[in-house]
Image (tube, grey):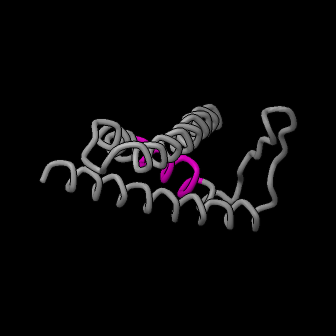
Amino acid sequence: MKKNLKRLNQIGEVSASLACIVAIFLIASLYIEPIKSWTSYLVAILLVTSSPFLLFTQGIIPLITGRMRVSLAFIYEFDAPPFFARLISLFYIMFGILALLLGFILLIVWLM
């Protein structure tokens, strides 16, 4: 069980970094080209595919267990106290839902 949680946490960290990259692409695509460009379509696909992983691994699991491993620039890692782990997981849930909604809105706009 501990190995599975560790693996899910690693997937969540990758999806969180992927969501940050996607946000950079989204900002660049909105400033460089109109909303119906191929980059906004790519961003929408990445947002829709990465946000469930972000929601589940970084949001729901720490909210239930109260345990989260925090990494500062991949140099120093520590276990967050349960209150802060649950608070951080609520932010991850909020950002995951916003990313999912934004991805669906971009897909709908692109397909119209």
Query: Is residue 76 shown left or right of residue 10?
Result: right
Which part of the image, by quadrant, shows the C terminus? bottom left
Query: Residue at 74% across / 45% down in the picture?
Result: 69
Query: Residue at 47% across / 43% down in the picture?
Result: 28
Q: Is residue 106 above or below residue 82?
A: above
Residue 1 visible here: no
Query: Is residue 68 shown left or right of residue 59?
Result: right
Locate residue 42: give its quadrant: top left
Query: 37 or 73: nearer the eye?
Result: 37
Q: Mainly helix, strand or loop, the magenta region?
A: helix
Query: Residue at 38% across / 42% down in the picture?
Result: 43
Which part of the image, by quadrant, shows the N terminus? top right
Residue 70 is situated, as x and y percent measured from the top left of the image, at 76, 46
Label total for image: 0
Locate residue 77: give its quadrant: top right
Q: Which residues are magenta?
A: 50-61
